[in-house]
Amino acid sequence: MGKFVLCYIVFVLGCASFSTATVNWWEDGSLYQIYPRSWKDSDGDGVGDLKGITENLEFLKEIGMTGAWLSPIFKSPMSDFGYDISNFYNIDPLFGSLEDFDALVAKAKKIGLKIILDFVPNHSSDECEWFQKSINREDGYDDFYVWDDGLQDPKNPAIKLPPSNWVSEFGGKAWSWNEKRQQFYLHQFQSKQPDLNFRNAKTHETMLNVLEFWLNRGVDGFRIDAVPFFFEKINEDGTYPDEPVSGQTTDPDSNKYLSHIYTRDQSENAGLLMEWRNFIEEYQLKNGGEKRVLLAEAYSPIDVIDQYFGNDTHPAVHLPFNFNLMSLDKSSNARDLEESINGWMDVMWKKHKSANWVLGNHDNPRIGDRLGKEKKDLFTIILAALPGTTVTYYGEEIGLDNVPTQCTNITCDFRDSERTPFQWNDQVSAGFSDSNKTWLPVSEDYKTLNVKVQRGIERSSLNIFKGMQILKHTGAFKAFKNEGAWKYGAVNDQVFQIIRSNSREEYRILANLGSDLELVDPLCNSIDQNECLMEYTLVNRNSPHRIGEKANLNKIYMMPFEAVVLKRKMQNVI
């Protein structure tokens, strides 16, 4: 049944492309975030690994992905599940070996899938050799991290106080005392994640070496972690200024206690991104092949993210992630959605002709839990219908929800619920592992919510996801850089519309974000009523319509949480 459904969708949508604008692979691609611990376990230890990923890469091609971004797989004590790296040049044994990684890259290249690695340059693990050398003030590593003598306690000169009042992202002081070195070190995250010092030339050189090492192993790009935190304000006399109190909370250990005007979004950050972009471009000239890309993670104001593109003479990253839609919640309506999209497009599209859309990741509750379980497929349709690149967090393609978790001897992280094992089938541990014991629990609904089951259900989350990925390859969607090739907006408080078109065809995507039946105002003002007729091409499970039915744009009713794709051929095309 599943194969029949997909074949029919291909027939209905078509795959011809008539775009004239040049489009690079990352500009309208479909990227998929794999959280390696939770995607596929190949050796039965209950934790996902590289061999498990390699054995299932074909699935990503099945669902139309351009590339896979792997969350950290490097050697790590796992205090922050891989974002605390102790060796930037090796794979953690939990995930496999460098040979396993090479096999993964080779398989990906064979099937035409890009591999993007997490690049974590802001900090290392405190168990990293670099940090240990820095503690010992070994030659070249003395200022590899951010160190400071601290301040004298005016009440007791024998007591040292932190250099500033800064608070870490996870709460508590951002400065920790190292007894051996007799200085404080900065950590914007955990105390086990000391910040690297990018005012030190050796730090720059070392991180370029890290990039080159993985480029030489065949990766197609990097997702750069924690961009807002690379630099901090330092006064001319070498001291660090206190940040002002925000007024948001009275808890001095809360990250919200201060306004982070000196520890986030400093102007030097963009220059560092430009340096890495220049390195990537030089590597490209020397080694050839397809373009390697830099992606950036930054929960920052739009004017700051704008800087991360760089400029005509000094480009920076290719794609700063767009987190605007992450602010939506269950109460958000079509006008809220339009405002969130405008927040990106009014700046980034106008200046850079670039758009990307992110609704989930390993740091935020899953889509159904944030936006409503009845809206999961609706947002799958909206995201893929918008111009630009989509970024899918593993499990979104089958509608995976947050899973209740409890603290264990392995993990007690507030983000565990959105990191649970992927659900492949209805067998032991949802096909994620041969073991009954997995590092995080499998959802209780895995018998019915899994890839195998959904392949055979016409309007399953998986088949809707696949259908939208097929749409992205049609001529109308591929023409997204052409003038007038897309429009979007709220047609009333609850119904949102996206139009994608070229000279041959037009698609209209309509989605009712509300819980009531909606009569849509007339959408067609043509004298020729034939131009007001379209055909249902893809529908979600809330729709009463069938693929192939006709729709009149001047009389459309939308059921609660219904989302549909309509299509028509242009009248002047034979």
Image (cartoon, helix red, strand yellow):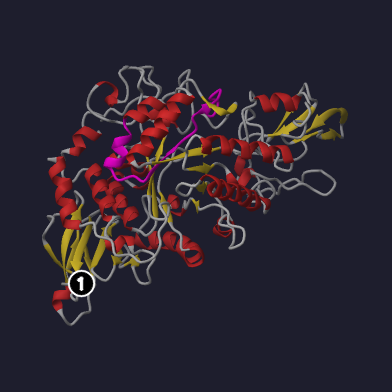
Give the SS element for disc 1: loop
71 inside magenta stretch: yes
Q: Residue 567's image quarter?
A: bottom left
What x and y, as percent, mark residue 506? 24, 67
What x and y, as percent, mark residue 180? 78, 21
Q: Nearer the viewer, residue 87 or 298?
A: 87
User: Can the viewer see residue 423 in this picture?
Assistant: yes
Side of 551 relative to 277 (left or right): left
The residues colored magenta run 56-81
User: Can the viewer see residue 419 in this picture?
Assistant: no
What x and y, as percent, mark residue 17? 28, 61
Q: Which residue is drawn at 42% across and 60% down?
A: 341
Identify the residue under disc 1: 570
Q: Which of 162 and 206 is in front in this view?
A: 206
Residue situated furthest bottom in the rendering: 527
Q: Which residue is drawn at 32% across and 26% down?
A: 442
Residue 538 in the image: above or below residue 523: above
What x and y, as percent, mark residue 339? 43, 62
139 inside magenta stretch: no
Q: Residue 211's image quarter?
A: top right
Residue 458 in the image: above or below residue 450: below
Residue neighbourhood size for the residue with mark 1, other residues' Cα within 10 Å, grouped as few (<14), some (14–19), many (≥20): some
